[in-house]
Amino acid sequence: MSRPTGRLLALIELLQGGGLRTAREIADRLGVDERTARRDIERLLELDIPVESVRGRHGGFRIAAGARLPPLMLDAEEAVAVVLGLGAVRRSGPSARVRTAAETAAAKLGRVLPTRVAGQVAGLAAVATTSDSDPVGPEVEASTDTLLTASRAVEEGRPLHVVHRRDGTTTTRTVLPYGVVEHHGRWYLVGLDSRSDEVRTFRLDRVERLEIGTGRFRRPETDPALLLTSSLASAPRRHRVEVEVHAPEERIRRLLPESIARLQALAEDPGWWCVTIEAERLDWVAGVLAQLDAPFRIRRPAELHDEVEGLARRLLAQLDVDG
């Protein structure tokens, strides 16, 4: 339990002891100054804890008579963490029983959270989806408010006014949000972009401002995680790679997931796939082709031939014949 949360629980216990408690008395009991004590009182009010303030010479603070306190006290960030954790288990838990338990736990959580916090995370519990990927690269943080606002708009079918920054350029647009997706440690908004009239993805850590607009729309049944991975795989890079590979689809996908490559079966050559990759560099593509351990034909670019031949020479040079 974090220190601020533990202090709030101690404050509730103090106020539940009966009688009025002055700010000075609260500060002394909690080991803080009066200003911090008053801020803690305000935090309790934000969490729907019914604290009454009595003015006057003998005034102070107390829990309202007959009030029922929520059995679970979490702020927005803590609630988001719990909801996302339960969502991950609900989607990919080790057994059906565990996945069902996560679903029932999420329902119970919604009933015992403070009303304001429960309303904030309700949308997140319903629409946040995680693509099948492991976190890679540096941590990138999206604000809790941005995540909650986007999730609420998805759940309610409401448009979003988005101010988005990328490569030093800031743009403003309206998006019909289809989903909020976590992928490789980053959070994305997926939706129909009013500027292009096409499905686009927006990294939430690059969103400078997000506002829910008026009106409503009906979300399509398409999985937003699939829309995201397809968009990432087709995003233009320095090199467009097209390679024909003779291998089972499952083997190719183990090394080249949907977020990296697009696959198309070759009708004229059963068992062969056309693999399309957008890549900034070609050296890693040559390494993946070697790991596939399957026949392949390079369509484009010609430079990939040089990378493959160079990798082969380096491997032969490192071969210890006498070892």
Image (spheres, rainbow, N blue to C red):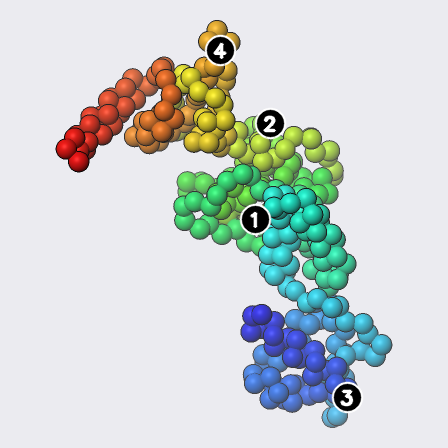
For residue 301, what is the image quadrant? top left
Q: The C terminus appears in which quarter of the rendering?
A: top left
> Residue at the spot x=64%, y=59% of the render?
79
> At numbered mark 2, what does the secondary structure look like: helix, strand or loop?
loop
Q: Which mark is residue 209?
A: 1
> At numbered mark 4, what does the secondary structure look like: helix, strand or loop?
loop
Q: The N terminus appears in which quarter of the rendering?
A: bottom right
Q: Which residue is mark 3?
A: 19
Whether tag 1 and tag 2 are in contact, CB under 8 A, the answer is no
Closer mark to the observer between disc 4 and disc 1: 4
> Residue at the spot x=50%, y=15% of the render?
265
Gap between marks 3 and 1 measured at Cα = 45 Å
Q: Is residue 137 visible from the viewing direction of this image?
A: yes
Numbered circles on residues, count? 4
Closer mark to the observer between disc 3 and disc 2: 3
Callout 2 amino acid: Asp
Q: Which mark is residue 72?
A: none
Among numbered discs 3 and 2, the one appearing first in the sequence: 3
Whether tag 4 and tag 3 are in contact, CB under 8 A, the answer is no
Callout 1 amino acid: Arg
> At numbered mark 3, what does the secondary structure look like: helix, strand or loop?
loop
Whether tag 3 and tag 1 are in contact, CB under 8 A, the answer is no
